[in-house]
């Protein structure tokens, strides 16, 4: 199956890859448009990550509503409640399947999220 890559990154990955009707979004981190990590803890970082997921999906012609699976890494499991409250606003009905784990992350951030969307081409 042919694949298409979308977007560019300063590291060796594609923000989004379409393989047939599926779009795979690389792990998104809480970095704003200026390239710096969003300050303020788990709530603003979760919002920024989900906005970055939304933007990566759009590069491949998909939307948050098309997401069928997410994987979430939290730096601290005690942030789960606050994270979950923000996450629920982005997936208010029929949320995707999700795995959430606590993990040390590659940079000094609170959260990273990757997503898989099912978005058939027109």
Image (cartoon, grey):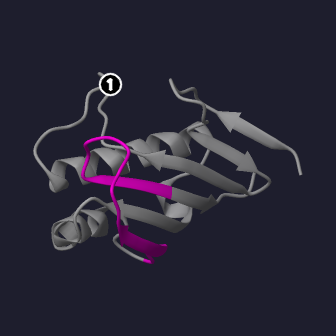
Query: Which residue is drawn at the image coordinates 34% and 47% (left, top)?
Result: 49
Q: Is residue 87 left or right of residue 9?
A: left
Let me know if residue 95 is in the magenta part.
Answer: yes
| Residue 82 x, y percent position in the rendering | 16, 67
Residue lying at the far right of the rendered structure: 1
Q: Is residue 115 left or right of residue 50?
A: right
State the SS at label 1.
Answer: loop
Residue lying at the far left of the rendered structure: 40
| Residue 96 x, y percent position in the rendering | 48, 73
Q: Quadrant of residue 34?
A: top left
Q: In this view of the protein, which residue sits in the foreground, 110 or 21?
A: 110
Give the vertical position of 56 relative to 71 (above or below).
Answer: above
| Residue 20 x, y percent position in the rendering | 80, 54
**Whether residue 85 is visible:** no
Give the vertical position of 85 relative to 61 (above or below).
Answer: below
Query: Which residue is drawn at the image coordinates 18% and 66% (left, top)?
Result: 79
Q: Is residue 72 left or right of residue 62?
A: left
Query: Which residue is drawn at the image coordinates 39% and 72% (left, top)?
Result: 100
Q: Quadrant of residue 39?
A: top left
Let me know if residue 49 is in the magenta part.
Answer: no
Q: Which residues are magenta?
A: 94-114
Q: Which residue is tagged 1?
A: 35
| Residue 108 x, y percent position in the rendering | 25, 42
Give the vertical position of 50 relative to 67 (above or below).
Answer: above
């Amino acid at each position: 199956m042919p694949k298409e890559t979308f977007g560019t990154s300063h590291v060796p990955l594609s923000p989004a890859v379409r393989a047939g009707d599926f779009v795979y979004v690389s792990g998104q981190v809480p970095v704003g448009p200026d390239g710096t990590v969003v300050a303020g803890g788990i709530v603003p970082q979760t919002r920024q990550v989900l906005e970055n997921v939304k933007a990566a999906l759009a590069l491949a012609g998909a939307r948050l509503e098309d997401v069928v699976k997410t994987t979430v890494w939290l730096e601290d499991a005690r942030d789960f409640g606050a994270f979950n409250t923000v996450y629920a606003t982005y997936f208010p009905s029929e949320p995707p399947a999700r795995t959430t784990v606590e993990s040390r992350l590659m940079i000094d951030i609170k959260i990273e999220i990757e997503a898989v969307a099912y978005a058939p081409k027109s």
